[in-house]
């Protein structure tokens, strides 16, 4: 399959866009004209479950003449990070669930979410969060983690990841190598981490466990850790992604950037972040759509005369193809409408009520 793709199609496969708007036409145009390989859904894309299905069908239909199926991704953690429409109840955050120390409850949480996603045509979830909850006043984590205990995060995170996989959804563990070490929100800042030893001795442990168990996809944070990533955020650092993650752990799964449109990353690096990402060894570049983003593709096409970049692109697209095959991803609509949201809401409410006892 790789040899049948043009360089433009390969670059498209490495890009995942989303829009925080009900108008998804710009994303459909990127799929049709630039062959992007993935889309991330946001809550503002729809106002009901019926509308969400219509959006997904529209995205998949836009891809019908392309050679590879789409990643349809979502950030669905439950609690504060809830991207499903309002007619589906919001499930309890994983921090409170984990405090029960009940593995069956953790599996049930993963099963409920994965079942909803799978039967709606979504094939990738940016979950679980494997950061350690070090800072109770951290607005970016805010009960999104399993625990402040390293062993619990490692154990519960592994169980959760494998439960998602069993349900046919690609789990993307995040935010490698561990966002719990900082109080700063990388949506607005570029956290600089000085305590390199703490990252290696504590924050990274849950990720090491899931990598050893066959983790298929990792999201890289925008942390700057001088000894690991140089002067760049980990998300676009070749030193970090290729020399550290891939070589140290012999990791050959997908590497996905955190959103390159987060405020300070976009402000400081702009289009340079795209070039750095292509060189870094990451496979999927995540971006929130901005007007005239179509111009980015010409910039990227001109950049791929470099042999090292072309080699990186071929390796990345090879990994993308492998994951799409492994999870049997397709653009078929037949799985739609299999979900009874009343039944799903019953199970969500049943789980949520266990916290009122």
Image: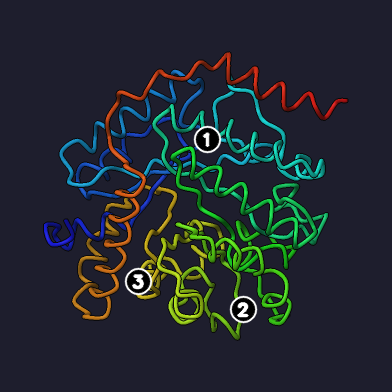
Q: Is residue 198 left or right of residue 228?
A: right
- Frontmost of labels 3 and 1 is 1
Q: What count of labels does the image hold?
A: 3
Quadrant of residue 83 within the rendered picture: top right
Looking at marks 3 and 1 on the same chain, the residue that comes earlier in the sequence is marked by 1
Q: Which percent across, then down, holds residue 186? A: 62, 61
Q: Name the residue: 82% across, 55% down.
A: 137
- Frontmost of labels 2 and 3 is 2
Quadrant of residue 270 within the rendered picture: bottom left
- Secondary element at tag 1: helix
Q: Which residue is disc 2 drawn over? A: 225
Q: Name the residue: 82% across, 40% down.
A: 100
Q: Which percent across, then down, holds residue 146? A: 72, 50
User: Which residue occupies the foreground of this view, 280 or 201?
Assistant: 201
- Pointer 3 local density, CA inside 10 Å: few below 14, some 14–19, many at least 20: some
Looking at marks 2 and 1 on the same chain, the residue that comes earlier in the sequence is marked by 1
Q: Which residue is disc 1 drawn over? A: 114
- Pointer 2 local density, CA inside 10 Å: few below 14, some 14–19, many at least 20: many
Q: Is residue 28 left or right of residue 174?
A: left
Q: Name the residue: 75% across, 49% down.
A: 142
User: Which residue occupies the foreground of this view, 34 or 217?
Assistant: 217
Seen in the picture, residue 109 relative to 245 is either above or below; the reply is above
């Amino acid at each position: 399959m790789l040899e049948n793709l043009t360089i433009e199609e390969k670059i498209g496969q490495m890009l995942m866009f989303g829009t925080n708007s009900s108008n998804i036409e710009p994303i459909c145009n990127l799929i049709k004209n630039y062959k992007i390989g993935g889309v991330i859904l946001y809550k503002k894309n729809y106002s009901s479950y019926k509308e969400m299905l219509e959006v997904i069908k529209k995205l998949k239909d836009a891809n019908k003449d392309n050679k590879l199926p789409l990643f349809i991704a979502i950030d669905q953690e439950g609690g504060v990070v809830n991207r499903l429409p309002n007619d589906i109840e919001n499930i309890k955050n994983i921090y409170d669930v984990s405090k029960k120390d009940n593995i069956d409850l953790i599996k049930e949480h993963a099963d409920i979410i994965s079942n909803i996603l799978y039967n709606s045509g979504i094939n990738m979830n940016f979950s679980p969060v494997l950061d350690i909850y070090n800072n109770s006043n951290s607005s970016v984590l805010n009960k999104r983690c399993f625990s402040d205990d390293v062993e619990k995060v490692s154990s519960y995170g592994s169980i959760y990841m494998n439960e998602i996989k069993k349900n046919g959804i690609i789990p993307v563990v995040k935010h490698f190598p561990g966002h719990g070490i900082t109080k700063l929100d990388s949506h607005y800042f570029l956290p600089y981490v000085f305590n390199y030893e703490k990252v290696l001795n504590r924050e990274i442990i849950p990720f090491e466990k899931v990598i050893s168990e066959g983790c298929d996809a990792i999201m890289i944070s925008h942390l700057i850790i001088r000894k690991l990533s140089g002067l760049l955020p980990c998300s676009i650092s070749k030193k970090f992604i290729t020399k550290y993650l891939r070589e140290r752990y012999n990791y050959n799964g997908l590497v996905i950037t955190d959103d390159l449109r987060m405020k300070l990353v976009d402000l400081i690096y702009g289009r340079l972040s795209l070039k750095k990402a292509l060189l870094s060894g990451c496979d999927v570049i995540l971006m929130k759509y901005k007007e005239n983003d179509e111009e980015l593709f010409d910039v990227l096409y001109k950049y791929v005369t470099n042999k090292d970049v072309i080699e990186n692109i071929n390796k990345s697209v090879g990994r993308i193809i492998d994951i799409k095959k492994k999870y049997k991803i397709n653009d078929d609509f037949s799985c739609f409408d299999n979900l009874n949201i009343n039944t799903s809401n019953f199970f969500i409410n049943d789980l949520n009520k266990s916290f009122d006892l």
